[in-house]
Every structure is written in C-alpha cells, then in structure tokens.
Image (spheres, grey):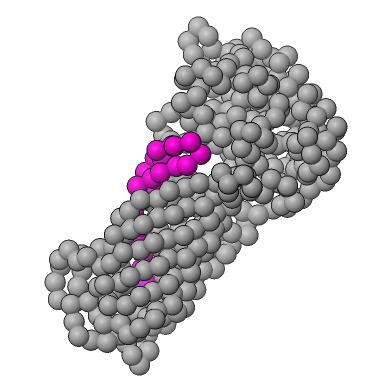
C-alpha cells in the first residue's frame, strides 16, 4: 500500500512538471524582414518619444498619464498593434533576452529597483546608452529620457529583451492579436544562445534523521551540471548530478528535468542510477534505490553576486530519493525519510552560452 501511494505521488509530480513545461511553450510566428523590423522599431520609439513630459501615476496606461509598463503597453499597442502583458515583470517573462552587444534601438531595458528582487522597471532603448521610461522620482517624475551610464541605472540593470525582430538580421516576430494577453515568440530565433544559461554547483550533503535517532549526519558531496532555457516565464532545464553518497555508501547519477520559476526557486525531478549496493544509514540493512520514481527536489538560491556576465549564488537544495527493500517492498516511513530526505548546501555559478562567443 505504501509503495502504491509513493508511486502515485511521483506520477502526479512528474505529470505536474510536464504540464507546466508544455503550458509555458507557445509558438506562433510570422516573418519580418530586417527593413520592416527597423521601421517598426523606429515607429515604436517615436510613439514613446511623443509622450515625453507626460505625468507619472502608478497603474496608469495613458494617453496623458503613465507608469513604466503602462508607457510600454500603450506605445506597443498604438504604434505596432501589439498587446503586451501589463506589468514590467510579466513583460520580462515573455521577451527574448539578448546580450548587451546585440542590443538595438527599440529593445526593452529591464531593472530591479525595489528590495523585492523582482523586475520592477522597464524602459525603451533609443541608442547612445539612453532609454525612455516613466519614472517616479519626486519633482523629476514622468516620462523622461535617462542614461544607462548613470550609476543608479547601472546598478539596477538586469537585462535587455526584444519584442520585435532584429533590424540587422532575418528572424521572427511574435504574432500577437489585440485580443491576446500574452506574447509568444518563435523558437526559430537565431539568437538561441542568448537564452541558454548553464550553471555549475557543488554541494555538501547532510541530513538530520536516522532510523534510530535525530542527529546531524554528513551524507556526501554533489556536483551538479545543469542548463536552462530562459525565454519563457517557467524556464525548462536539464542536467545531471554526480553524487558520492557516503551516508549510504554508494555512488549515484540522477538525471534531472527542471522548471525554474525565477532567480531564487526551481523544482526538479527525474530518474536515479545507482552503481553499487546501498546500506541504510546508521544500520547494516541493505536496501536498493529506485530508478523511477527516482528523485524530486526543490532549490532555493540567494540574490546573485555579479562578476561580468557570471552570477554566483549560495544555494540550498532539499530532495527526496526513493529507496525500497531488496524485495521491492516499501521501507517503513522512518527508514524511507532517513535514506531519502537530504539537504544540500553549496555554491552555484551561472553563465550564459554567449560568454563563449557563441
């Protein structure tokens, strides 16, 4: 009975993962030539410039009063017929992220200006390190032109995103109808590498529960190699973990499929391959691991220390790996938790594929 419940739990978890993955991928595209894209970008910028001096008001979407995302929303709709999401954070979730080297006039510039750590401000890049946005800054509030070279904006800058194709090369534009609420981008974009991010993590593994007592235990070390595609609101990813499990006296190789919600939280699950016999912690009892269902886990990260294009985070993972008796029957609850529930504390380094010039 316990085994059936556990298998059902993992099946539901994997089904949830797959549903979230496919719901985040929507692909509808039409072609636009570089000349057409350049003209669309110019029109977008001219519409925004026509509102310079307008008043700032939180939640306003024009035509006389705007907040930051309201200006983007209004300008895109009136100049291009695009229906964007309503907030800076939501817009960021749907754009195609590009490197600073590939930034063009008409791209969107995103910032984190609050203590929440979330995207909270957006502007339109107009060239010469300048951008237009609606800001709330006392007597200087309103739609203004600002410089990316100002220390405040340099410190708060996060990324550049595109809602239009490049004016320099043939690519794809999102097909957005006035009735739609989301932007959808083609997977045929040529700058695939701009959205592909790799991370390398190293962990110390530990646990607090054994079958006989509640005590801190060193459980081994992990090295995780992982890649994620950051175009969508939920970023899908794939990776592997090299695990030396000293607590159970074994070497394991989990293969993980992940969904990353933001810079601070991700969920993963997948099969686990074990290469030698397994002994229950604090016991001589032999058990065996399950390939599938294998592992399910959550990862929590701190805000990043940014070094060039590389980000460094402290990370805490919590995962549960399935183990059974040698005859395939379920372990007792305390044995199952003792063997499978482990904490992983470590450091993660993230870097885009474009760092290699790809």
Q: Reply yes or no: does residue 315 show up in magenta.
A: yes
Residue in front for this viewpoint, 214 or 196:
196
- Tell me what residue is drawn at x 60 percent, y 29 percent: 109
- Tell me what residue is drawn at x 55 percent, y 54 percent: 228
Number of labels in the image equals: 0
- Is 159 placed left or right of 324 in the picture? right
Q: Quadrant of residue 335?
A: bottom left
Residue 146 % position (x, y): 58, 16
Residue 262 % position (x, y): 48, 46
Residue 99 % position (x, y): 61, 37
- Tell me what residue is drawn at x 50 percent, y 22 percent: 153
Would residue 37 be visible to someone looking at this image? yes
- Tell me what residue is drawn at x 52 percent, y 52 percent: 198
Q: Reply yes or no: does residue 217 show up in magenta.
A: no
Q: Which residues are magenta?
A: 301-321
Q: Residue furthest bottom?
A: 327
- Is 183 placed left or right of 304 in the picture? right
Q: Is residue 283 above or below residue 135?
A: below
Q: Is residue 303 above or below residue 112?
A: below
Quarter of the figure with the N terminus: bottom left
Would residue 7 be visible to someone looking at this image? no
């Amino acid at each position: 009975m316990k085994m059936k419940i556990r298998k059902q739990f993992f099946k539901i978890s994997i089904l949830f993962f797959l549903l979230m993955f496919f719901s985040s991928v929507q692909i509808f595209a039409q072609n636009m030539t570089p000349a057409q894209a350049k003209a669309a970008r110019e029109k977008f910028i001219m519409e925004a410039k026509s509102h310079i001096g307008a008043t700032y008001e939180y939640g306003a979407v024009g035509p006389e009063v705007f907040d930051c995302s309201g200006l983007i929303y209004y300008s895109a709709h009136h100049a291009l017929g695009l229906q964007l999401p309503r907030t800076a954070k939501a817009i960021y979730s749907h754009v195609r992220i590009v490197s600073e080297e590939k930034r063009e006039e008409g791209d969107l510039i995103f910032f984190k200006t609050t203590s929440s750590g979330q995207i909270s401000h957006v502007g339109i890049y107009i060239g010469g390190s300048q951008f237009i946005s609606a800001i709330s800054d006392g007597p200087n509030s309103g739609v203004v032109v600002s410089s990316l070279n100002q220390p405040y904006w340099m410190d708060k800058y996060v990324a550049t995103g595109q809602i239009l194709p490049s004016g320099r090369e043939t690519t794809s534009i999102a097909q957005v109808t006035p009735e739609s609420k989301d932007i959808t981008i083609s997977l045929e974009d040529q700058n695939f590498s701009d959205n592909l991010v790799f991370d390398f993590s190293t962990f110390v593994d530990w646990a607090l529960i054994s079958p006989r007592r509640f005590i801190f235990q060193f459980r081994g070390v992990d090295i995780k190699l992982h890649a994620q595609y950051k175009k969508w609101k939920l970023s899908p990813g794939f990776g592997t973990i090299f695990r030396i499990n000293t607590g159970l006296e074994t070497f394991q190789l989990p293969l993980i499929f992940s969904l990353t919600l933001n810079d601070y939280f991700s969920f993963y699950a997948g099969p686990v391959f074990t290469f030698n016999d397994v002994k229950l912690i604090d016991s001589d009892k032999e058990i065996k691991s399950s390939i599938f269902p294998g592992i399910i886990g959550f990862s929590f990260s701190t805000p990043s220390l940014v070094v060039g294009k590389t980000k460094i985070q402290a990370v805490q993972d919590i995962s549960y790996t399935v183990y059974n008796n040698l005859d395939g029957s379920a372990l007792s609850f305390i044995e199952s938790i003792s063997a499978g529930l482990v904490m992983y504390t470590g450091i993660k380094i993230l870097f885009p594929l474009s760092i290699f010039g790809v």
